Amino acid sequence: MLSVILEARQEYLVYEGVSISDYDYIVDRLEESGYKKTWNRLTYFLTSERLMVSTPSALHDSILGTLMSHLGRVLDTIPVPSKMVVHRIMSTRSVFLESVHAIPDSSVMMCTRGGRVGRPIWLMECAFAQSDGDVMRELETYIQEIPSLLVVGKLVVKQGQQYHSPGSKVSAAPQLRSSALLTQMEWTDRLGDEFGQVICDGHTWLSLSSVEIHMWTRQAGNSKIELSDMDGNGYAFGTLFPTLNLDDINCSFQRGLGLIKQEVLTVLESINADRVLFDRTVAWSPPSPLEPALLRNALEFGAWSMAYDRYAHWRSQLQKKPYNNGP
């Protein structure tokens, strides 16, 4: 298991029946082996003894990175000194909860006391490398065990067809197999304009069926977010592909930012902040909504990059046994 996890990329692997002592042993050995230098992330459910290994893809990194960067820029406009409240966008922060040890794909930390104390208020996960069921299980666990959460969401990337590497099959991608590794520019020159179906040398490197965004916000009077509430204002759904419609997601963003604003005001009250500062924060409103075209461009870039990454990884494996035909 260790040798597999240490591979440069594992899009998605699941191991059942992994005890907590097994998990601790694996983590210790991986850290000794320089695991933190690899791309792979571990998610471990303590109750079910389920260990998931996944590699963040260029596709989901590009979309979530763009979305959360926009959120970070908006939060930076809240007129509060950073020594009182500051928000940090995180993509590698581990959470160690009673029933799960994981690294959320992206999170927002509200930091107080000069940035020394932080609590997660917004978490996003991606259902692509992971299954949608596993992502929902993670989100539900976060909600139950992190009372400070105001917003959670998931990016759902559905493939038109499951990706399969050309492997060592001689008839698959013969031109790419016989040529040296192409640069991304050379690779792009061989492709058409359809990022949702990336085919090169007769092989499908990426096939997208749909890309969706789902978001849940905590409702007034509730102590926690309700994932089961799919009809009220606490839930929003939007699409990036094949159609582009983020109207409801933009509304959800506004509600989430309103919740964060109220949390900031609560912090200011608790420290008896200057009344002028308090009133200025009350008057604050988000400067701009999400730009659908910006996220669509992030999707396109991520799709092209992921297809190339798959090609480059496969091409690098050709020189290794058993792909090569050497002794």
Image (cartoon, rainbow, N blue to C red):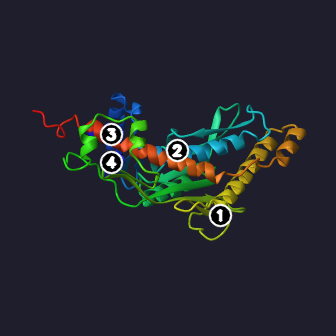
Q: Which residue is mark 1?
A: 234
Please say if the residues under marks 1 and 4 sit with CB atoms less than 8 Å apart. no
Where residue 131 sits, quadrant-wise, is bottom left
Crowd band around label 3 with a 10 angstrom C-alpha radius: few (<14), some (14–19), many (20+)? some
Label 3 vs 1, first from the N-terminus: 1
Q: Which residue is mark 3?
A: 313
What residue type is disc 3 on? His
Q: Which residue is mark 4?
A: 19
What residue type is disc 1 on? Gly
At a point 62% along the width and 63% down the height, the residue shown is: 236
Q: Quadrant of the C terminus?
A: top left
Label 1 vs 4, first from the N-terminus: 4
The mark lying in front, picked from 1 and 4, is 1
x and y percentages locating residue 72 in the rendered image: 66, 41
Disc 2 from disc 4: Cα separation: 34 Å
Q: Secondary structure at mark 2?
A: helix
Q: Secondary structure at mark 4?
A: loop
Please indicate whether residue 164 sits to the left or right of residue 92 in the image.
left
What residue type is disc 2 on? Ser
Disc 3 from disc 1: Cα separation: 41 Å
Residue 62: assigned label: 2
